Image: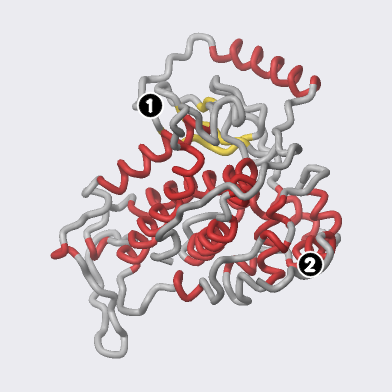
Amino acid sequence: MSNLFSGINARFRGQRSPNSGASSPSPEQQQAQAQAQAQAQAQAQGQHPGNLPQGQPGSQSSSSNLAVKLPPLPTSPSLAETIGMDQASGMVPSAEEVLASYHLPPVKPLWLNANYAKHIVKGNFLTLSAKPKTVEMGEWIAHQVVDHWRMLITFIRLVHDKEEDGTSICNSRRCAKMSAGSNHSFTWLNSRYQPVEIPAYEYLTLVQRYITGKLDDTSIFPTDPAGVSYADNPAFCTPVPESGPDWVGKRSGFPQNFMETCQTIFRQMFRVYAHLYWSHFEDMFCLNLEKSMNSCFSHFILTATTLNLLKKSDLEPMQPLIDLWAALGTFPQGSKAYEIANIAVGQLLIQKAGGPPASN
């Protein structure tokens, strides 16, 4: 994977499809949003949250998320929970019903066609995600965070960096908010710790600043070689229990919140991938880089699920592609990515695309 992007000198090989624009909210959604905002403002009067540093990662939300702090509301079950409740009651939904619950647009995204879900390399990416026996878990997770960020930043720069005329592929006119299709949008926390919707271009700027700042912070990712430790090998020694609380990476000098920080970084990287697929996949196709992005993202999903860096609910915006890849054999049986996939839905997507993909 380290040579995946060496010597990239891409050229456009076609134009984007005319049906790739984002849909605007319906009048009913706008009315509901206005009513919710009025109620929230009435209840929020007199509240003055303390100032916090700007540039904090936000949360996943529907397209009707507001910038104000909303009062606690009963939470509705997620897609995974809804399917789980159906199974618990003995009503197992069919592949068609599950696929319909994804609320995909009438014209399916290009990346849900098996012929465009191919990879630039072949092999089992799970071997790249599994921790070697002699490597301490904290060291391995830190390595994976840095390695996956190094691969993702290449795609970010392709859509984020401005050309000579001052324009960029991802811009506020084309991507008015950080979204992954019409069902998922992502917010950022402002200086008063309130979630706000911002253009995707600005979101990508803040993500780069946030993750780079974390990786450069030696109190979170220490760089002193003297602090490196190795995993105990039970065949040669008996691990000596340490006093006090234990956490992932403690033996190598990583802080107590290290795992939480890495999970937040992976969650932000996933949101960037989700936006790239839903809004810029055709751009990657025109640059002849769709196979490269597929390779990096499938490796990312295997790593995130293997090391418990993402929850199943975090993956919902890209669940259809996970189903497809599992059915195609990209995710090997026994992997956590395979376990969270719906193989029947993946097989249905293959059928709707006209059968298995042609060989590379």
Whether residue 92 appears in this view of the structure is no
Residue at 86% x, 61% y is: 94
Residue furthest left as drawn: 226
Is residue 52 found left or right of 352 in the rendered image? left
Up the image or down, 183 lies above or below 333; here it is above
Whether residue 12 appears in this view of the structure is yes
Q: Which mark is residue 54?
A: 1
Q: Which mark is residue 347?
A: 2
Categorize mark 1 by other alpha carbons within 10 Å: few (<14), some (14-19), many (20+): few
The spot of residue 164 in percent (x, y) is: 44, 31
Up the image or down, 276 lies above or below 243; here it is above
Amino acid type at mark 1? Gln
The spot of residue 170 in percent (x, y) is: 54, 35
- Counting residues from the N terminus, which is met first, the one under dot 2 or under dot 1? 1
| Residue 136 picture quarter | bottom left
The spot of residue 353 in percent (x, y) is: 81, 60
* Number of marks present in the image shown: 2
The spot of residue 282 in percent (x, y) is: 64, 46
- Dot 2: element: helix
- Would you say the residues marked 2 and 1 are in contact, meaning their CB atoms lie under 8 Å apart? no
Depth check, front residue: 329 or 186: 329
Kindly report the distance in space between the C-alpha atoms of the residues bearing marks 2 and 1: 44 Å
Amino acid type at mark 2? Gln
Residue at 38% x, 48% y is: 261
- Dot 1: element: loop
Up the image or down, 118 lies above or below 231; here it is above
